[in-house]
Amino acid sequence: MSKGRGRRPDKKPHLRAGLVPASIREVRVGADVGFWKTQAPIWAFNRMVVDGPFGWGRADGATVAWALGRLHLLGSMTWQDILSKTDSHEVDIVSIPNADIARELQRVGLEDIDSLVSLHLGSLPRIWGSRQERTLVILFWDPDHLGWPSIKKHT
């Protein structure tokens, strides 16, 4: 066994260039708060609503597989592209037209969020979620676009 290979217990670990321990990082003042738009989304499924009018329990296995496939495709895009090129959008909770969505948000303890993201998956189906930076917490399944129905001109 050769000498000198072990680290002395009193010696501090060496930091590689560019690495800063979390304990001494500082928050940058004036940091770009829209940085998430240039990144691909992360999908979080830990708060999915299973029952109720917009619950995932209403979807069969083939539909869930199809929705996951659409999420996979959207996952290759940046948030900027998703929100500008796919008819997906973020909406303020204040102007929510569907009382069922408001009740469901309260039931799952998310009544204090400011907005929801509606992911456009096809002509009608939508996935609703709460965006936290680049992560979308998947909440509701809306197969008939009833959560926030579009009001078309001249209809």
Image (tube, rainbow, N blue to C red):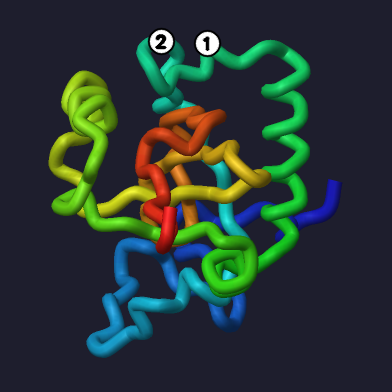
Picture mark count: 2
Q: Which residue is mark 2?
A: 51
- Point out which mark residue 119 bears: none
Q: Quadrant of residue 53?
A: top left
Q: Report the Cα–Cα distance between label 2 and label 1.
A: 6 Å
Residue visible at 45% across and 60% down in the picture:
89
Q: Quick check: can you spot residue 121?
A: yes
Q: Residue furthest right?
A: 1
Q: Which residue is mark 1?
A: 57
Residue visible at 58% across and 56% down in the picture:
41
Q: Position of residue 51 (x, y in %)?
A: 40, 10
Pointer 2 and pointer 1: residues touching (CB < 8 Å)?
yes
| Nearest the eye: 39 or 53 | 53
- Give the side of residue 21 with respect to residue 121, left or right: left
- In the figure, 148 relative to 75: above or below? above
- In the figure, 78 relative to 98: above or below? below
